[in-house]
């Protein structure tokens, strides 16, 4: 529900496969569930029903998501994906 409150703004969620406290699969399901609210605004939410493979970001909708290899924390890979997502949506 918390993710849905961001609609219709851009939202990005990320996890790491070894960060089990974050629950990568649960975060993906939350993005998927929040997509319904984005659709009420005429936007594409996550844009997929399939959890992406490791290091394969989903960035076509207004909700972006990726799960990368590694543990808790933000890495250069994460920041690169954040910038790719905003560049794609802000037409840079």
Image (spheres, helix red, strand yellow):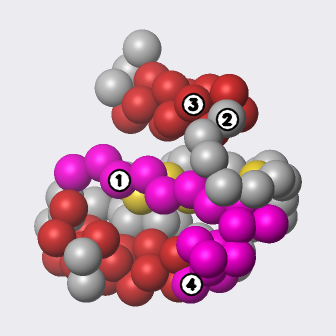
Q: Which residue is mark 3?
A: 79
Mark 2–mark 3 Cα distance, whole angstroms, equals 7 Å
Q: Which residue is mark 2?
A: 75
Say which residue appears at 48% left-offset and 58% top-offset.
Answer: 13
Q: Position of residue 83 (x, y in %)?
A: 50, 26
Q: Which residue is mark 4?
A: 26
Q: In the depicted view, which residue is nearer to us: 76 or 66?
A: 76
Q: Is residue 33 visible?
A: yes
- Asked if the residues shown at circle 2 and circle 3 are in contact, with their CB atoms under 8 angstroms apart, the answer is yes
Label number found at residue 11: 1
Magenta segment: 9-26
- Name the side, left or right, on which 77 lies relative to 82: right
Say which residue appears at 70% left-offset and 76% top-offset.
Answer: 20
Q: Position of residue 28 (x, y in %)?
A: 56, 75
Location of residue 58 (image quadrant): bottom right
Mark 1–mark 3 Cα distance, whole angstroms, equals 14 Å
What SS does tag 4 mark?
Answer: helix
């Amino acid at each position: 529900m918390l993710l849905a409150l961001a609609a219709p703004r851009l939202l990005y969620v990320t996890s790491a496969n070894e960060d089990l406290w974050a629950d990568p699969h649960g975060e993906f399901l939350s993005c998927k569930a929040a997509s319904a609210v984005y659709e009420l605004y005429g936007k594409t939410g996550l844009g997929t029903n399939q959890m992406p493979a490791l290091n394969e970001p989903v960035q076509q909708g207004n909700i972006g998501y990726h799960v990368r290899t590694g543990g808790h924390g933000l890495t250069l890979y994460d920041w690169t994906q954040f910038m790719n997502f905003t560049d794609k949506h802000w037409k840079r």
